[in-house]
């Protein structure tokens, strides 16, 4: 009976559940999306709006910021949410800067001669230099406790000056990829 | 001795605690509709892992016997369990994304913006180690592996796990059958506070044949695995997925993808030592090896 008792103790003693399996569940990766909305109307040839977005107010970023080891730009798009009238033809211009309107430009994109309508979307193709600059800004954000703010501008120019009301609601959608250790 | 025992037990509980905490963190932004697809391969792994190495012979002697087994196994992840097709809200088209064992996080784009899914942990195989004891008498054998109730972490969450299996040699009732045959029924549970309640039922039909000091064995198994889990969604009013806009607690039951499996293996007996190795083909296949001390 003593031997059986010893076996029970030994079994419990040796029980190391999910040994190497646990080490595998340390490194995580998630995408963090955010959106900036711009709304403006005009009776002449141009709409313009600017917004400051604070990633520090993003609940997903806040959930992971202490665990992030690498953070990078993944993708960005614009999406037209509404227009008055139903279609407009003009030049779409987007600017994203660091921190505020005096910050360095992270990227500027122009889409000339575009028909603007509800649901219209397109992707921003960034150069390697623009991506590097964006990623450096993100690095400063989580590793050097830098500012978490982005400044964005959206404009529709070259609209027909017909005296009628023209209105656009456009969203800038950005997707960042975070890697870290849980 | 007692102190070492306590330290080891707390270590094993802590390992599970860290695993659970990690998965909990990742699920903060996964809707209830998608958590099943994301976690199902992991539930399957626990099922096949707990049921592996439960036997290396169908024979059970009449006289009283006991033994200890040190069992190690690799659960191999098939490629098709590294991705799943998530549920998507209206206005989005579903694309494959990573399960808990997959790689990069997936995302889709639609009128509300980007919807993202968590990445996996890039797991190709899971290594598990379970010591277990055997007690046999009159053709019936009890196999057990367990951890008693532990209080883990600052919040002193309760953790325990056990698996018990009863094997009975059937061919002892028949003459002239040229091999040994047995039926084994096992039940396992992993409980972690009120957040994770894992249950595994396994039935194994076993056949073995002795050739001197070696034994060839094989088995057909049926497993049913499920977990009742709860986790918290952080809530993000601006999230493109309507299911992730409010903070809430999610409760659900996830079934593993275990079902039927086939095992083939061999054992070598040297006095009180028995070495065995086997391969189980299931939705996740398992390579298992054991060192047994049998008296």
Image: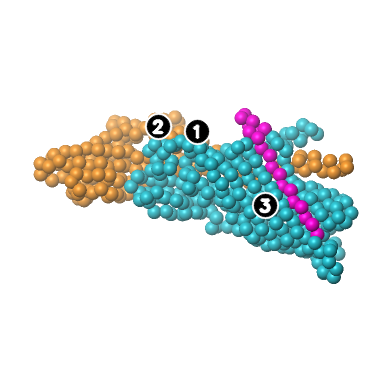
- In which image quadrant can residue B208 be found? bottom right
Q: In this view, does A50 lie to the left or right of B185?
A: left
Tell me if residue A19 can be seen: no
Residue B156 placement (x, y as % from top left):
64, 31
Image vertical order of residue B121 relative to residue B139, above or below: above
Disc 2 residue crowd, few under 14, some 14–19, many 20+, Cα 10 Å: few
Residue A44 placement (x, y as % from top left):
13, 40
CB contact under 8 Å: marks 3 and 1: no
Residue B98 placement (x, y as % from top left):
50, 51
Image vertical order of residue A170 relative to residue B285, above or below: above
Image vertical order of residue B170 relative to residue B30, above or below: below
Task: Name the colouring of the figure.
Answer: by chain
The residue positioned 51% from the left and 46% from the top of the image is B35
Query: Disc 2 marks which residue?
Result: A57
The residue positioned 81% from the left and 67% from the top of the image is B179
> Which circle marks residue B201 in the picture?
3
Q: Closest to the observer: A2 or B77?
A: A2
- The chain to which mark 1 is attached is A
Query: Disc 1 marks which residue?
Result: A66
Q: How many labels does the image show?
A: 3
**Which residues, given as a range, are shown in magenta?**
B151-169
Q: Is residue B30 left or right of residue B194?
A: left
Q: The cyan chain is which one?
A: B
């Amino acid at each position: 009976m003593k031997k059986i008792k010893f076996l029970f103790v030994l079994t419990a003693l040796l029980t190391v559940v999910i040994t190497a399996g646990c080490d595998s569940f340390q490194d995580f990766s998630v995408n963090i999306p955010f959106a900036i909305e711009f709304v403006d109307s005009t009776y002449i040839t141009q709409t313009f709006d600017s917004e400051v977005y604070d990633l520090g107010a993003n609940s997903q970023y806040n959930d992971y910021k202490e665990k992030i080891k690498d953070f990078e730009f993944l993708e960005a798009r614009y999406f037209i949410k509404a227009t008055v009238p139903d279609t407009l033809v003009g030049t779409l211009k987007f600017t994203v800067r660091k921190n505020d309107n005096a910050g360095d430009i992270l990227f500027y994109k122009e889409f000339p001669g575009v028909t603007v309508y509800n649901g219209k979307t397109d992707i921003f193709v960034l150069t390697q230099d623009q991506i590097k600059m964006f990623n450096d800004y993100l690095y400063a954000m989580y590793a050097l406790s830098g500012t978490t703010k982005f400044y964005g501008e959206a404009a529709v120019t070259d609209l027909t000056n017909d005296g009628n009301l023209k209105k656009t609601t456009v969203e800038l959608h950005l997707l960042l990829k975070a890697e870290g250790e849980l | 001795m007692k102190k070492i025992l306590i330290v080891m037990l707390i270590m094993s509980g802590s390992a599970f605690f860290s695993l659970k905490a990690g998965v909990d963190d990742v699920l903060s932004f996964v809707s209830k509709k998608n958590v099943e697809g994301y976690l199902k391969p992991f539930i399957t792994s626990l099922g096949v892992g707990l049921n592996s190495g439960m036997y290396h012979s169908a024979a059970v002697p009449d006289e009283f016997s006991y033994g200890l087994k040190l069992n190690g196994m690799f659960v191999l992840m098939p490629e098709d369990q590294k991705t799943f097709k998530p549920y998507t809200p209206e206005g989005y088209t579903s694309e494959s994304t990573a399960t808990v064992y997959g790689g990069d996080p997936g995302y889709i784009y639609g009128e509300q913006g980007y919807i993202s899914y968590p990445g996996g942990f890039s797991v190709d195989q899971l290594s598990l180690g379970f010591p277990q004891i055997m007690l046999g008498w009159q053709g019936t054998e009890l196999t057990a592996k367990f951890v008693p109730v532990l209080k883990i972490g600052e919040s002193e969450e309760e953790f325990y796990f056990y698996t018990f299996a009863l094997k009975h040699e059937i061919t002892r009732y028949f003459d002239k059958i040229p091999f040994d045959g047995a039926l084994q029924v096992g039940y396992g549970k992993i409980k972690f506070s009120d957040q994770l309640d894992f249950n595994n039922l396994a039935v194994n039909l076993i056949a073995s044949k002795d050739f001197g000091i070696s034994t060839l064995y094989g088995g057909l198994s049926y497993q049913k695995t499920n977990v009742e889990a709860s986790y918290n969604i952080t809530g993000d009013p601006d999230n493109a997925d309507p299911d992730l806009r409010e903070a809430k607690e999610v409760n659900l039951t996830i079934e593993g993808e275990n079902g039927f499996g086939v095992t083939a293996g061999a054992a070598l007996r040297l006095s009180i030592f028995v070495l065995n190795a086997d391969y189980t083909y299931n939705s996740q296949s398992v390579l298992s090896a054991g060192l047994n001390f049998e008296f």
